[in-house]
Image: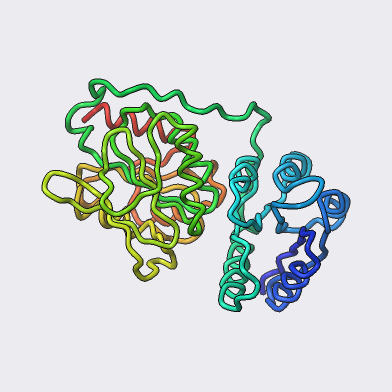
Amino acid sequence: MMNKIRVFIVDDSLLFRKVLIDNLSKNPNIEVIGYAVDAFDAERKIPALKPDVVTLDVEMPRVNGIEFVKKLLPKYPVPVILVSSLNLNVFEALSAGAVDFVRKPDMSSSNSAGTFLNTLISKIFIASRAVIKVPAASPAPKEAVRVPMGKAAFSLNASNTIIAIGASTGGTEATLQVLKELPADTPGIVVTQHMPEGFTKMYADRLNRLCAMSVKEAKSGDAIERGQVLIAPGDLQMKVVKTGSRYTVNCYSGEKVSGHRPSVDVLFQSVADTAGASSVGIIMTGMGRDGASGLLSMRKKGAFTIGQDAESCVVYGMPMVAYNIGAVTRQVSCSGIAGVLMKHLSSL
């Protein structure tokens, strides 16, 4: 029998705290060991209670969730799950070391509340196994200086290559780390990151500010082009399709695959079917096995495939399964992925 996961709740709303405490306590594998009404209260209690996971409201009075994460994690590296409304601040908190986030529901809707609670419980289990990555103190990332693209620095074969990236828990920052090291004329990239509807647009906009390539949330019919990154929209599946000589994406409301919508397996399988050997697949940090079978299909069709290694993953799940089934050509650290990718593209 597994030990109960000790959860600590930080939220200034009495009603929302009660909902969380009552419902999380119903799970036989979770023990709510305490709560805090604000960051100061939490700062006193967390070191004494030693929780396994902290749930943290992003919008709090006096000290918000971002500042609290920045202050807490260097001293007490505990997995933090953010509970947030549609707010750009969630990505700042993730960059400060929070593990994951859940969108705050409309509590007047029982369906919305039920989905939220199920998602939160699932993420608590994942977070309890996460390796906390506390970033070294550094200046805020600068916006990319994007220069117009001239003649392609890559061969025609490389320029026609599709690069597909899949990630889950810990992937928002891991994907950024890879993309910000790539030049503006890198061949077209498609990304599936497990993320709720609404947040994918904000995430794409954030990447667009910080990367040399152009980044946008995808919509059906968008072309996959040199210098462009397309992010799968939250709550939609995204496939790569070929029309004539052009590759585009199709975003649609299909069934969940491997438990997810968007699903990395859907994206990778479509790349295997349409681009085959003219593609690169990259699977990164995340729980479960989404993307592993799709990456194997890509490799069997001749694609070059990269898996993030255990040491640099927040959760070594998806890349581990992919590696174990033979889907990974090269396994490297997150910081090494861009270099391995560029070396491969330069060899084509």
Q: Is residue 27 left or right of residue 328?
A: right
Residue found 58% across the figure and 54% down from its top: 86
Quarter of the rendering occupied by the C terminus: top left
Can residue 51 be spotted in the picture?
A: yes
Vertical placement of 302 versus 9: above or below?
A: above
Q: Is residue 295 left or right of residue 245?
A: right
Q: Residue 298 at x, y = what percent?
A: 26, 51
Q: Is residue 345 left or right of residue 61?
A: left
Residue in the foreground of this view, choosing between 85 and 98: 85
Residue found 53% across the figure and 46% down from its top: 313
Q: Residue 193 at x, y = what percent?
A: 45, 52
How is this picture coloured?
rainbow
Can residue 319 be spotted in the picture?
A: no
Q: Residue 57 at x, y = what percent?
A: 71, 56
Q: Is residue 65 left or right of residue 217?
A: right
Residue in the foreground of this view, choosing between 326 and 277: 277
Residue found 27% across the figure and 31% down from its top: 345
Count the numbered circles shown. 0
Quarter of the rendering occupied by the N terminus: bottom right
Residue in the foreground of this view, choosing between 212 and 81: 212
Q: Residue 144 at x, y = what percent?
A: 47, 27
Residue in the foreground of this view, choosing between 208 and 20: 208
Residue found 51% across the figure and 47% down from its top: 202
Q: Quadrant of residue 56?
A: bottom right
Vertical placement of 7 versus 98: above or below?
A: below
Q: Residue furthest left?
A: 244
Vertical placement of 252 versus 314: above or below?
A: below
